[in-house]
Each structure stands twice: as C-alpha cells, then as structure tokens.
Image: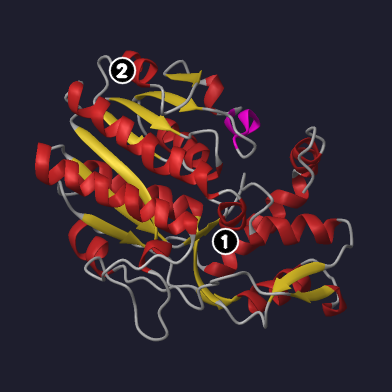
Amino acid sequence: MKILVTGGAGFIGSNFINYMLKKYDYYIINLDKLTYAGNPENLKTAETYKNYKFIKGDICDKNLVLDILDDCDAIINFAAESHVDKSIETPDIFLQTNVNGTVNLLNCALKKKIQRYVQISTDEVYGSIDKGYFTETTPIAPNSPYSTSKASADLFTYAYFKTFNLPAIITRCSNNYGPYQYPEKLIPFFISKLMENKKVPVYGDGKNVRDWLYVEDHCRGIDLALHKGKEGEIYNIGGHNEKTNLEITSLILKKMGKDESLIEFVKDRPAHDRRYAISNDKIKAELGFEPQYTFENGINATIEWYLNNKEWIDNIKNRKGELV
C-alpha cells in the first residue's frame, strides 16, 4: 500500500508515521507545509526507512497534490491548524487550511480514484456536554473557530462520500498527549514551564474536563479505521480518562516534584467548552479497539520523554519569533 499522510510533521501525524513504518512495509509520503508546529525533528526515525518520503508543500496546492497521488492507495489527512487560542486570534487561517485544504484533498482524491480517505477530526466538533458521552450520532455543535473549521471539513468529507461515492471515513479523537507534541498544548506547555521552575497558567477555575488519549493509542485506532472501517462511517477514538485541567496540573506538578504555588489562575478563554467526553463503544464493537495505555502509564512516559528531550524543546524555543 502507498499512503499519502498530510501534516505528518506535526504531533499526531509524526507519531502515526513512525507507528506505521514500524508495523508495515507500506510506502508513506509525508506532505507537510512545515508551519510553526511542523517539526522535521519528529521524523528522524522515519528518515531511516527507504519506504518513506517527505515533501514540503501545502494541501491547498492542487497540482502538487495531484502529482503526489500518482499510484497512491490512501490519504490520511492530519493537516490542520489546531490551537484554539490562535483560531480566536486569526480564524481566517483555520478556514484556509482546515476547510479549503480538505476540500482540495477531496477533489484530488476523487480525480485519482483513491481507495480510502481518512479525515482526522476532533471531539471538539460536538461542543460541550455536562453529563454522559458524545456518540457518532450526536449532532455537532462547535463553539470555537477551530472546532467550526474541523466540523466543516467533516461535513465536506461526508458530502463527498454521499454525493460522489468517495470511500471516506472520519475519525474523531479526544485530547491527545505524548511525545513530540508542540509545547503550546496544556501538558507539554506545563512540563516545559516547570522545567524552568516557571508558573503555569490555568484558565478560569481549572475545572474544565477533557478525556485524555495517549497518542500511540490514537494511532492504533486510526490504523484500525484505515484497514477495517466502513466507508461513510464516523469512529470516535477516546481514552476514557476524564480529568479536569486542575487535576492534570496538580499531577504534573507532583510527578515533577514541584509545589502548587506555581499554579497561576488566569482569565478564562472565550467560549471555553466545559467538558468533552466521547464513547468508544462503536469502534470497540466494530473494529476491536481498546486503549493499551492507562493514564498513569501514559503521563509517566510523556513526562519522561520531555525531560529526556530538553534539546527538542530548546530548538523550538530558539526559532526566530517562536517563543513558547
């Protein structure tokens, strides 16, 4: 199999490429624009494989995508702007990449008769839920420019399945954590701050709840969707590890031997969703998915990775105009 992975220099995409190259003999092409969150250092292992190729480019570039897709069997679209705060500051960038870029990929996939298209999405498209769990049939109700752009991409993907019979699948994951995550996201951001004994900013009262999924488990779920998923279906991939932001903060402080005096409560984010929680029942029943990592094992592995890879963090901080 020959697979185009878009956004493969980012956090989840790079973990997925490393996972797939280790497991299969597939030829993988990685198309990434290398925006601020795309990091070639994430792919040092991948570069040792002869069946891996990196191409710097934009998913909005129709001619480039069409050229790359020659003889490709599948597309897995990770490429996206993903930071909620940045989407509030500059929503137009999210429209361009997350919506227009996805539509370009869908059009190219149709023209090249791709056998499988997997759209990587997020539980944030469902909005906030006080009790219970989101399922694949829950109506989407996004609240931020980021989640709205991802919801739009999902709708276009499903429309191409219904209208043009594109063999597409959508996966929606809960909050990922693990190695290679750009340190603007909560867990690596706090770890990097605490490594310098700096305070960590917690939005509002810190009681916003997220379900946490170790990135390797997410890769395993996408692998199952790629090979066993049914065309036109949505699969939620969650970890069933619900924690408040304050619980996560306290846990990281404890594991790093820091005092809770380093917590600094700050003004809450606009339209900050209170709780996300998704059900794994469908992907478990239909595809046999089960998370392999407990949160305890996953967070220990994550903290250890960042502590052992301080140079990786320093290289990001030292990029011109990109201070974390």
In three-dimensional space, the C-alpha distance between marks 2 and 1, rounded to whole angstroms, equals 38 Å
Q: Residue furthest right?
A: 197
Nearer-the-camera pick, 247 or 291: 247
Mark 2 element type: helix
Q: Is residue 41 magenta?
A: yes
Point out the stretch of residues depicted in magenta: 38-43
Q: Are marks 2 and 1 in contact (CB under 8 Å)?
A: no
Residue type marked 2? Leu
Q: Main secondary structure of the magenta part?
A: helix
Residue located beneath label 1 in the image:
298
Query: Residue 156: where, in percent of width, then height?
Result: 25, 46
Return the disc, 2 or 1, that comes first in the chain's sequence: 2
Q: Is residue 2 above or below residue 296?
A: above
* Crowd rating for badge 2 (residues with CA inside 10 Å; few <14, some 14–19, many 20+): some
Residue at the disc numbered 2: 66
- Is residue 123 visible to the viewer in this orientation of the structure? yes
Circle 1: residue type:
Gly
Q: Work out whether 17 lies above or below 137.
A: above
Residue 251 position within the rendered picture, expressed as x and y whole percent measured from the top left: 69, 74
Q: Is 160 in front, or is 185?
A: 160
Label 1: state its secondary structure.
Answer: helix
Q: Is residue 289 visible?
A: no
Percent across and percent down for residue 112 are 20, 21
Figure label count: 2
